[in-house]
Every structure is written in structure tokens, then in C-alpha cells.
Amino acid sequence: MQIEYKRVTKLFSGCGVASLLGVLSYEAYRTYAALTSLVDTRVLDIDRKRPDYIYIKHHIYRQSLRELAASEENRNRWMTAIVQPFEKWWKALKHSVAWRLLRIAQQGDQAERLKAVQQLAQIDHLKDWDFQHLAQLCDYQTAISLARCHSDTRWFLPPRQYGVLLSMREVLGEMKSLLELLAPHKCAVYALEQTFGSSGHIREPDGDEVTYQMSPSRFEYDQLKQSLSALVHLTGLMGEEGKENCRRIIESGGLLQLIEVEKLFQNDIDMKLLVSRVVANLSAFEGRGYEFFASGWLHILARWKRDVDMRIQVTADLTLENLDQDDPNGFRYAPKVYPLHPRGRQQAKPAVDVVFIHGLLGGVFVTWRQKDLKPQAASLLEGIASYEDELLTFQESTTPKRRDPSISDTETKELIEALQQEEPLGSDWSVVYPDVPMAGDEAPAGTSSSSGDAFSVSGEQWLQEPLDAGQRSFCWPMEWLPKDFPNIRVIGLNYDSSLSQWSATGCPCEKYDGKLEKRASEFLEKLATSNVGQDRPIIWVGHSMGGLLVKSIMVQALQSSDPRVRRLAENSKVVMFLGTPHRGSSVAKLKQHTSALVWPSVEVRELEENSTQLLHLNKTFLRAVDHLGPRKPEIISLCEGRPTVLTSFKLPIHVVQESSARIDAGDFYMTSEDHLNLSKPICRQSFLYQRLVGAIQAAIREQKGTETKEEIKSHVTPQAHVFTRRNTSGASSALSGLYTQLKQFEQLMNVFI
């Protein structure tokens, strides 16, 4: 009982203490609040900086602003009086000069038009709206000329509704309508049946429970690709048949439908190549420049000239040159004839035509590549599999920086580095060509070696040629020859071929009809149409089956009654055979059971060893060349010295034996390369390239030696007359001189404006 009393006492005591503390705290708070309300504590913040407010009347504030603006205007009155009118005059002058040049380009004579277009192509300082205005004033021929001169892309109006994309199925329907226009042709009927089926409707992807069904988008993509391939073939036919196909496509609005494909596949190189080839074939149909201009294709072609892939660039150049009717030194190129150089307007006709023809499964941008520094096994299917979906960049010709010398292998590089460490190399040392022949019947007469040795180059010349693994050329005739011979024309012929009928093209016109003689006859007409060798010498370079095509072309040319065609053979100065099977190849001869399984193509069967057709062609060619007498061309033959290793089977095979590569005429060299690398020099100081350079130099010297003074005068007078007319044209020369000062003066005036 006593314990419970103590607990209660402690509890009440604790509550009393807590209550007392609460009362004291409350009273303290009340006292602090009363004191705060009576005393102004801001007097303690004397040092704190506070905003000061000045209250003024509204009309006084407005008056002060007006006075401030008036004083600023008075201060800049003299500067405004000078700069503002000059700024307006400057903008009007820039537009006026471009407008007057454009007027001369449209209404002047040919000399004035050429000069005005050259000046217009250099204009890039105008505003976008100025270019838009000038583009609307530009006619189709001037626009084509500007596109060829690599001018600003703002000169060209884009296609109508270029930002609107159709679906792939809608584009496929438009391609189907184009093929239906050409349906009377058996290839068009075959393409429609294979691509769209006999029902006439767009097919759906096939599939069942066992096989994997292809997605609709991929299936439509393949159908569209097959349709474009058929259009490439149908528009590339020679004669009236091809012209009629091109006329039907253009007049039915096919150029606009092709733009829809281009918009849909701007980043697909395979589709772009197919579309570009169709457009290039359509451009060969003369007198259709306005349709290309009105449809907006000039805007796309001008952009393609700047594409990173050289195949697109070359095709765009070909198309624009076919459309250009105002170039006195231009040409018209037939389908499958690619102008590798020059790629723009020139001031004179070329001095020499150099024609390259690839072999079986090759191509313009496949056969004529620079040799890879990394040794690897070759592939006979290189034209089909190895370079698929590859981007082919073009190395622009710029001033080379001094880098490591072009050494063919690591051992040679280490040797020179060791010699340089001991003592500096003088100017009396030379380097043997990387691909020096192992044997040769005769020393080359036209070599460009300065050391006197036919198979070596001086050390100074060797060190001037840089070689970087990252700058491998995808088409050395296009990139190297113009550096040594700017005034020549380089042409590459292209054709389709296959090893087996299983992989042959689906077109019935070509699948079983790849006869050598027929193909050479087609190229004969195309080369004559492209004005090859009409008033200048020709140098032929043929690799493998390409050499057989060269022989057949020359034989048929000499048998022709057309003077244009005959000049193809009569003006031939050099024929270079690279691994050409003059008597066939043992690889093409298969066992009977193997032949039934592989089903070799017509091209392969034509290359059989000791073929009657090839032996007859060889005899006819040698006889025809001998009949040319003093105009007989120089013959150069290179043969493979080591077997070609196939990547699939690792089998070393001599594709063309020495006995077949010998033509029993001219110079013959046994090289250390295999069959595929015969056409791929390792650098510009290789034997193959230098031998070709020497042959071109000899042909140019001979051409100059045979021309009389009257002929030289006839070549020079028209060009001198053109420059005279240009100088006597007061308006054109004054505007061109004014333009050169405008662009330099603009940067200075921007400081004041």
C-alpha cells in the first residue's frame, strides 16, 4: 500500500513540473511577441543594400525614350546614309550580275553561252531565294549545262512533291505499268510473267507450314528489283527497238515514276544503280532534255555528281553529257559505254581514246581495281559475290603530301629503311617494278623509265608516288591515267556474263545467246555512236575474254562498209592483251557428266581449248592486222605466271596457259601475277601501268608526227576563234570581270553591313 502511494506521488509531481514548464514557455513566447510588435528590428540591418524606387509620371518616361532614340539616330545618321543604300545596291548588284549572265547563257551565241555558264557555275554567294528565282528563270539547256559544270545544287528546282513518299506496293504497281507498255517485246512479257505472275496482279509471297514465308516488304523489294533489271535491259537495246521502248517510257511519264523509286531507296546502293542505269539509257534517246528538266531529274543528277560512290558519279556524268546539246566537244554515249574521263566540259577534243574491256564475270569497277596489298586467295566469282553491296569511293586528285614511298612489299620497305639509316640515298638509285615480268620476248620500246632500264624506275620518281592502304583505287584507269594524260578520253565497256546457265540472267534474249561475235557487233555500233576513234588513235586494253572481243571488233570493223565503223580498226594504234585465251582455256572444257551437272553458259563453251571459232578468229585477226600495213597497231601481250587459287576449293588453276596467251605477234611478257591480278597493278610505278603509259605516249607522238601544219591549224583555229569571240564580247567579259571582284569584296563589306 505504501509502494502504490509513492508511485502516485511521483506521477503527480512529474505532471506538475511539466505543466509549470509549459506555462513558462507560453508566457515567454507572449512576451517576445509583444516586444517584437513594439520595436522595429530593421534598424539593425543598416548595411544591407535595398532596391531604390523612383516614381515618375508615364508621359515623362515616354518622352525620355523618344529623346534617347532621337539621339541614337542622330549619332548613326551618317553611317546609315552611306551603308543602307549601299547594302540595297550591293544585294541588287549581286542578283543583277547573275541575272545578266543567265540571260547571256540563254540568248548569246555559243562562245558567249559557254563563257557565261562557266561564270554562273562558280556563283555560290547568293541567298537561297536568289537561287530559287534564278532557277525559275533558267531554261532546260542552261540547267543541263550548269549541272555538267558541277555548280551549286540550288540552281535546280527539286521534283514536285519530293518529300512525299509512296508505299513500296504503289511503286511496284507503277513499274508494272511501265513493263506493260513494252509488253509486245518477249523480254517484257517474260519479266511480267516471272515477276507478277500470269494473273496480271502483284503476286503475294509464297509459303506453307514447312517453308519459311518471306515477309511482304522483302518480297515486294525483290519484285521491284527484277522489274528495274528488266527495264535496264529493254531500254538498252540497240536500234529502233530500244528507241521505241525509251519513247514509250518517257511519253507515258516514266521519268516521274522512276523518281518515286529514287525517293524510296535513296540509301540503297543497289536500287540507285539500277535506277541510274535506266535513266542513263533513256538519256541516249536524243532530244529529250526538256522532259528530264521538267520532271526534276536535273536536281537529282546534280546531287548524284557529288555521290560518294563512283558508279553513281560516272552514270550521272554519262546522262548529263547525253542531254547536253550545247557542248562543242561533247559526245553521245550508247548504253553500257561508260566515260571514265573526262567527266565534264572540255575546251578541246581528246587526243587519244583508251578503251578498256573486262573479261568473264568482270566489270568496269571490278576488273580494273588496284591490287590489294594484303595477299589473299582470289575468286572466279569476284564479279558476283565478293563486291556485292560495296561502296566504291573516288579519290579526288589533290596535291599529294609526302608520305611513305610506294613499296610493293614489307621486305623492300625494310631494305630501303636500312639503307637510309646507313647513309642517305642519292639520286642514282633505281627500283625495279613490283610486277616485273619473269620473261619477255622483246624490250618495250615506249617505256617511260628515265633510268634507261625497261623494267625499273628512278628512285626520285619512285619516292614521288605515295601509296596508302586506305586509298586503294577501285578503278585505276579512271583515277591514274587523267593525272598523266589530262587530254585523253578513257572509256570502259561493260557487259553481263555468267559461268553457268543456272546463274545466267532471266532475260530470254541473253540467257542462251551470248555469242562472242554478236556481242562484238553490238559494241561496234555503240563505239561508233560514241565517236570513238573517229579522228584520233585508239588504244585497246582487254582482259581475258575482253581481248577476244577486241579482236572480233577490229575484224568486223575492217569488213564493214561504213566509214565510221572502219575507222575503229584503222585508227587502232595499240592492242594490249591481258591473259587473253587466243586458243581457248582448258578450264572451260568439262567432262560430259560434269557439263550436264554444271550446265556451262554460252560464254564458257566459247572459251573451250582449241575451239574452232577461236582459232579462226585468231588467224583472221592477224591477217587483218597485217593488211593495215604501216598503220598496223602495236600488240602487247601479258600472261599469268602463277596459278589462280580459288577461295572455294583452294585449288591452284592456270586459267590461261602460256601457249594460249601467245598471239605470235608483238611483245610478250610472262608476269608473276595470277589471272585475276593481271589487270590490277599494285601502284602507278608497276610494270603494267608504266607499259601502258609508254604505249599512250608513243601513240600521241606518232599522231603529232603524222599531222601536217594545215591539220594542226584546222584544230587550233576554231578554238582560237572561240577565245577571240569571248574576248570581243563586251558584256560577257565585263560581267565575268565584275563577278570575280564581287565575291572577294563581299566579305569585306559584311564587316560594315
Image (tube, helix red, strand yellow):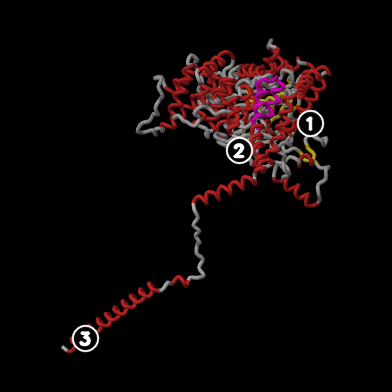
Relative to 242, residue 54 above or below = below
Name the residue beneath numbered marker 3.
9
Q: Is residue 242 visible?
A: yes
Identify residue for label 1: 447
Q: Residue at x 57, y 22 (%)?
A: 292
- Label 2 element class: loop
Q: In the rendered structure, which amino acid carries the disc numbered 2?
A: Ala
State which region is magenta.
Answer: 94-119
Q: Amino acid at mark 3?
A: Thr
> Which residue is outermost to the top?
561
Question: Crowding at label 3, few (<14), some or many (≥20) Cα neighbours within 10 Å?
Answer: few
Among the two numbered marks 2 and 3 on one chain, the one whose residue lies closer to the N terminus: 3
Q: Which mark is residue 377?
A: 2
**Label pair 3/1, CB-CB below 8 angstroms:** no
Q: Nearer the viewer, mark 2 or mark 1?
A: 1
**Where does the N terminus fall, quadrant-wise?**
bottom left
* Residue 602: % across, % down: 56, 21
Q: Position of residue 671 (x, y in %)?
A: 71, 33
Residue located 69% across and 14% down the image: 564
Above or below 58: residue 243: above
Decide which of 652, 290 is in the foreground and name it: 290
Q: Quadrant of residue 540?
A: top right
User: Under tag 1, what secondary structure?
Assistant: loop
Q: Quadrant of residue 387 in the image?
A: top right
Report the residue at 59% width, 14% height from top.
239
The nearer-to-camera label among 2 and 3 is 3
